[in-house]
Amino acid sequence: MEHVINLFKDYTFQTVALGSGILGLISGILGTFAVLKKQSLLGDGVSHAALPGVVMAFLLTGAKDTEILLLGALTSGLLATLFILNIVKHTRIKFDSALALVMSVFFGLGLVLLTYVQKIPNSNQAGLKRFIFGQASTLLQKDVYFMTVCGAILLLLVILFWKEFKLFIFDAEYAKSLLFPTHRLNLLLSFMIVMGIIIGLQTVGVILMSAMLIAPAVAARQWTNRLWVMVMLSAFFGAVSGISGTAASSLSDKLPTGPAIVVVVSCIVIFSVLFAPGRGMLQKLIHRKNMKLLLKNKGGGADVSST
């Protein structure tokens, strides 16, 4: 117990836990809109597409600063998002196919560039690999400030466009009939999701970032049908996962922080899927069993497997 108390007094832990908590909160809020808009895999595609931007930023500038590398990731992520949206809009290719195509091309390009960079003298010290698997322990105070500012901007945009986003994600055609700028709303929402992903690359990496974006929202969806409640729950689950995963990683010598955070949020998803009232599997099984008993007592023999 004393070890845990000392851990929470440690400055490095406080910095990493605060950064991970902010990342979880932002991811939870933005992930809600991605899940409800049925574009959950957009986060996966954009996070993988950010890798060539990180490497290109290093190649062009030679700088190792996190802000410059993340700017490259943002550029690459936005470019990939625009490719996906335009392929879907101007061709007959479905969203999932366009996503898989763009993700594969960008991630493959990123790996090629990363292999090339690793052969350049002194490039190993650039720390580019941390963007693949994440390295939360490298978070500094300035990184937390950067995440806080970006998170505040994203939260402000969510509040300002709450009504428009709500109508757009639930019924885009109705929003269009009311002369809402649905295309611009889609671009704005995609830009915000890309921003949220870029913020988390240093902490959990391109491979695990999609889990941070989607898992809290999926868990929250099991507990409510109201949007604002789902957003709040998703943000809470994300923040708790970030802080708990950081604590678990700090208490164990060989447990990386990024995967630990994803394991914690995955446990929340599993618990929610099993035990949430209304949508949980356990309650559905109990309801189905009660229906069978009721029909049996009334002398019926109908199949209630689909109830």
Image: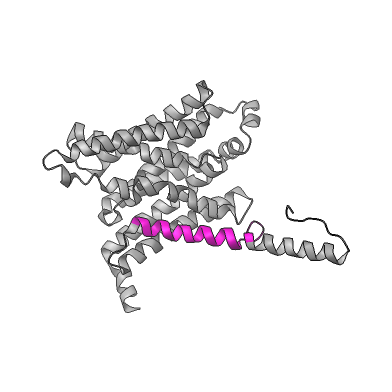
Vertical relation: 44 (above or below) 247:
above
- Asked whether residue 156 is in view, the answer is yes
In the rendered image, residue 277 lying in the magenta stretch gets the answer: yes
Residue 195 location (% of width, % of height): 39, 40
Vertical relation: 253 (above or below) 136:
below
Report the quarter where the C terminus lies. bottom right
Residue 93 location (% of width, % of height): 51, 26
Residue at 53%, 46% in the rendered image = 32
Residue at 40%, 35% in the rendered image = 103
Vertical relation: 175 (above or below) 34:
above
In the rendered image, residue 86 lying in the magenta stretch gets the answer: no
Q: Is 268 on the left or on the right of 125, as rendered?
A: right
The image's colouring method is one colour
Q: Which residues are magenta?
A: 258-281
Name the dominant secondary structure of the magenta segment: helix
Residue 264 location (% of width, % of height): 44, 61
Report the quarter where the N terminus lies. bottom left
* Residue nearest the viewer, comparing 100 with 66: 100
* Residue nearest the viewer, comparing 79 with 297: 297
Vertical relation: 42 (above or below) 4:
above
Residue at 67%, 62% in the rendered image = 283
Residue at 40%, 38% in the rendered image = 46
How many tags in the picture?
0
Residue 24 location (% of width, % of height): 42, 53
Q: Residue furthest left?
A: 121
Q: Residue furthest top?
A: 90
Q: Is 169 on the left or on the right of 49, as rendered?
A: right
Q: Residue furthest bottom?
A: 2
The quadrant holding residue 167 is top right
- Asked whether residue 149 is in view, the answer is no
